[in-house]
Image (cartoon, rainbow, N blue to C red):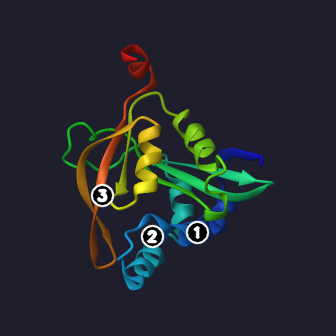
Amino acid sequence: MLFSTRTARPADAEALSDIAAETFALASPADASPKALNAYIRNNLQPEHFCLQLMSRAKKLRVLEHDGVVVGYTLVDTAAQALGIEAADRLPELSRCYVLAEHHGKGAAQRLLDDTLAQFDGAIRLTVNEQNARAIRFYQRNGFRQVGETVFVCGSERHRDWVMVRACATADAAHG
């Protein structure tokens, strides 16, 4: 399968919203209510939200394409809010890394993550639901380590997320 990556464009907003709506539940706990998931999608993952993110200097969106069709995306916030965790605060945050399910297990997410991480010189953080074992293993294989926990508010529900940090590649090489 041939995958390619590029910077997202305003014309991608509809596709990004569709991917977000389809994949968000996959990254959420199994007991998350459809009402809470739908509220989050409605309030945060619509095309207009992606258009605003594309206009922000602090947000960096990359897309993964398969045969010219957008099948995944990442969003990095270079001005992420403090979490009260010294090892993670003041780091850019990989706030989304989503690939359509039919491309799981085919190297798509790895290609997208590699491309995204290559855009940043230093350490980077992310949060991932504590029940998302597949994603946690993926991030651990890519050098991320848990440094704390935070709460993710989804509609009226509160979910526990791990906060994970990946040290900068040069620091990893110096200690490897």
Q: Position of residue 89 (x, y in %)?
A: 26, 41
Of the pair 165 and 10, the residue shown nearer to us? 165
Residue at 45 percent of width and 53 percent of height: 135
Q: Quadrant of residue 17?
A: bottom right
Which of the two discs, 3 and 2, sits closer to the camera?
3
Position of residue 115 relative to residue 158, above or below, is: above
Circle 1 is placed at which residue position? 17
Residue at 60 percent of width and 38 percent of height: 115
Residue at 36 percent of width and 76 percent of height: 32
Circle 2 is placed at which residue position? 44
How crowded pointer 2 is (Cα within 10 Å; few <14, some 14-19, many 20+) is rated as: some
Q: For numbered disc 2, what is the local secondary structure?
A: helix
Q: Is residue 86 visible?
A: yes
What's under tag 2, amino acid-wise?
A: Asn
How crowded pointer 3 is (Cα within 10 Å; few <14, some 14-19, many 20+) is rated as: many
How crowded pointer 1 is (Cα within 10 Å; few <14, some 14-19, many 20+) is rated as: many
Which of the two discs, 3 and 1, sits closer to the camera?
3
Circle 3 is placed at which residue position? 161
Cα–Cα span, label 2 and label 1: 9 Å
